[in-house]
Amino acid sequence: MVIRSLGRVSPLERMPPGIKLTLSLVVGCGLVAISDIRIAVLGSALALFLHFLAGKSPWRTARETWHLLPFLAFLAMVTGLFHGIVESVIFFWRFTLLLWITHLLASSTSSAETMRFMEKVLGILPLGRLGWSSRDLAILFLMAVRFFFFFRKEIALLRKAQKARAFNIKGLSIEQRFRYLLSMGIALLDSAARLSHRVTLVLRAKAYSPGPSPYHLARKPGYELRPKGAYHNPQHETDSEGQGAQKNPLHGHVWGDSLDHE
Amino acid sequence: MISLRNVSFRYSEDDPWVLQDISLEIPQGQLSVIIGPNGSGKSTLAELITGLLEPSSGNILVGGLDTREHPPHMRGRVGLVFQNPEHQFFHTTVAEDVAFGPQNLGLSPEEVEERTERVLREVGLWDLAQENPMNLSWGQKQLVAIAGILAMEPACLILDEPTSMLDPPSKKAVRSLIRRFRDRTGCTVLWITQDMEELVGAQRVIVLNRGRIAFDGGWKELLGLESLLQGMGFQRPTALELVSFLEKRGLVEEAHLLLFRWEELLSW
């Protein structure tokens, strides 16, 4: 919506996330299920076309995903032991393509779009009866992704701090290594708990309230979005501003400001 | 107008008081600096005014409404910028992250878009609208975090040590941005800091120490209270020490020139 139109966007970024998800599922199934050189060639052509649509160089994708390639190479080697070298190479190439295409589609989809899409998909389920909201689950998903990156960064920082204090895991016995991992786990858990608290505060400071989004609610009768131009102007603040405050019928909050000053 | 009446706060009944008997009246449009050592309750005070915490006793009124019943953050009334910008991002592009707050306020999509564009241009990050905020420099990250709150157009803006992790040019950029925003909108600004130089030119300085207000007045007056500052572990800015030194040596004119230039450079 809105914000995608701000700044530069490629055709791939403008593509609806639903289509991207379907595309990655179809391509994924094809590449995983059919071990054929033609499928690998078709996949390569598709990957090149998608890079063209995204306005991104394939080398950049390769650089961004290189750390997963050794794992694929290992699996390809195992395949090679049973099916020969040609099969091993095709295996490696198919899964590398799958990785690149998925990465490209994911990186060209913004988190807000992913969230809206998830909200839409989850909205089909009767989550309301369980007291859950699809929007809350979608933001939980976003947070989970964020925590993955947080853990990665935190582990790297902890390791650097340990190295700076002359720590070397190689000299440790198995028991000591276990203790070391345990202490790392506790330190990470502690950091995660602190971050969760901080993120909750920030979410609230940005006026996030659990439950359906205002845009979802706006589809129902009796709820209106704030009209254009009817926003709050701080210069109009007065002590009596609360008197004309409106009650949001579904959230139970007082919007207060803007509309009173019109 | 923000009004705190005998506000005390502690996290639970077993914990010590974080804030005790705080009474303050902050008029609309005022630029106040809150200063105090670590653990003096500055951030807690900010969270109380924003409505993220409820006072254990006493009342806080924002625009005449009690924060217990009408949390001001839910109406975009009071905006709080935290110290670490990385904790404040939810989305993978700058534009979407800035739009997150206005969307939560239930503004129309056109309004959200208009505000996002205006604020991004105001903070000078329009060209980076589609970048991932996590990939920006620390100063730019802080500007994105501030832009996310400015887009909510709060009547009161609280900044919790926003420059403590920034280099001097970024510090200057953040201060200048806040000054421009305040001039444009007339919003109240509560600037929390530990940097003595950030007091210069503030309309009001509130000093918190051990959960109580130790001083409430002008910045010049505070800088003259050496024993109070030393008691909290603060030192007068080096430039002021230099001014005193010059005065003692009889170089009064030079001292005044130095003071004038120092004020000019640092003033809000």
Image (spheres, helix red, strand yellow):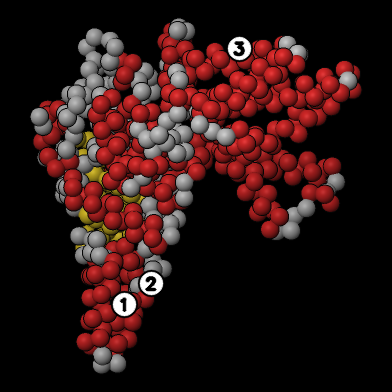
Residue A108 pos. (x, y %): 50, 28
Residue B133, by quadrant, is top left
Q: Is residue B183 left or right of residue B237?
A: left
Mark 3: amino acid: Val
Q: Which mark is residue B235?
A: 2
Mark 1 Cα within 10 Å, few/some/many (few <14, many 20+)? some
Q: Is residue A188 left or right of residue A200?
A: right
Tell me the mark number nearer the camera, choosing from 2 and 1. Answer: 1
Q: Nearer the viewer, residue A223 or A65?
A: A65
A96 in relation to B223, above or below: above
Residue at 46 percent across and 34 percent down: it is B92
| Circle 3 SS class | helix
Tell me the mark number nearer the camera, choosing from 2 and 3. Answer: 3
Residue at 73 percent across and 41 percent down: it is A181
| Circle 2 SS class | loop
Q: Label 2 to label 1, Cα distance in Å?
A: 10 Å
Residue B262 pos. (x, y %): 28, 73
Q: Nearer the viewer, residue A121 or B137?
A: B137
Mark 3 Cα within 10 Å, few/some/many (few <14, many 20+)? few
Residue at 21 percent across and 41 percent down: it is B155
